[in-house]
Image (cartoon, rainbow, N blue to C red):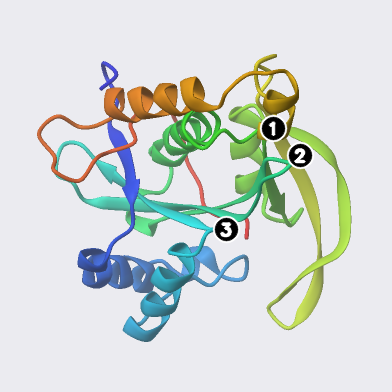
Amino acid sequence: MADGARVYLRHVREADRREFVELMRKSTHLHAPWISPPTNSAGFSQYLARTSSRDHEGFVLARYQDDVIVGVINLNNIVRGSFLNASLGYYVGAPYLGQGYMAEGLELVKQYAYATMNLHRLEANIQSDNTRSVALVKRCGFRFEGIAPAFLYIDGAWRDHERWTCVDERSSMLPASALVQLGTTPAPLQRARVAMRAAFSRPSDPNPAITPTIANDSETSS
């Protein structure tokens, strides 16, 4: 656990149902019209099922001081092969807006995506009017790539989105096929990922945390 860190990441689970849904209900005024998180039990069940699939991972962002859920971060549409990419979705709970938790969480998910999942690229697709979210990804080191016209159907219409990306710059970051061609076995990478996961675990928690780093606010990108 990093010194001074206030939050940790862990995978969402069934036991989160009540707390998760209550927080999202309290936050609808903040999330609309950008995103529509689950606000009832049926929606949470669908969300939990989606995060159990091979191409999605869902995390809650919780405070160390009391283990309260302050936000959610998702890695969606995970692609392997030569792309090693995922789309980032995130939303903070309204009571915790502006306290730096989500920026800290995005730094954590970047670490996890690169070091443990062996991803090369994360992208956040954000509507231009969502200025708080744009400012957040800028602070977290994402770079603007351009506009994707009519990218997602949200709130009754196809919406243009800005595409912001963050890339792992390590020269050792290669697809598995390239490692095979180079005669490098994936086993050392797998051992490194296991070690990283262990180092990032919360010692007193039987449910491993994915751990801390930096600071500041906001909500969404689907």
Q: Residue furthest left?
A: 204
Q: Quadrant of residue 214?
A: top left
Per the rendering, the mark at residue 175 is 1
Q: What percent of the width, then of the height, locates residue 50?
A: 48, 69
Q: Amino acid at mark 1?
A: Pro
What amino acid does circle 2 point to?
Ser
Disc 3, disc 1: CB below 8 Å? no
Q: Left or right? Give the position of 16 relative to 106.
A: left
Q: Identify the element where label 3 is drawn.
A: loop
User: Which x, y percent locates residue 186?
Assistant: 55, 27
Give neighbour class at mark 2: few <14, some 14-19, many 20+ (Cα, 10 Å): few
Residue 133 seen in render: yes
Residue matched to label 3: 55
Which residue position holds label 2? 82
**Proximity of marks 2 and 1: CB atoms separated by less than 8 Å:** yes
Whether residue 153 sits left or right of residue 67 in the image: it is right
Q: Is residue 192 above or below residue 112?
A: above
Q: Residues within 10 Å of mark 3 (few under 14, many from 20)?
A: some
Residue at x 56%, y 70% (from the top left corner): 32
Q: Compare marks 3 and 1 and give the one earlier in the sequence.
A: 3
Depth check, mark 3 against mark 2: the one in front is 2
Task: State the separation of the CA atoms marked 3 and 2.
Answer: 15 Å
Q: Quick check: 205 above or below 75?
A: above
Residue 198: percent from the left, percent from the top? Answer: 28, 27
Q: Label 2's element? A: loop
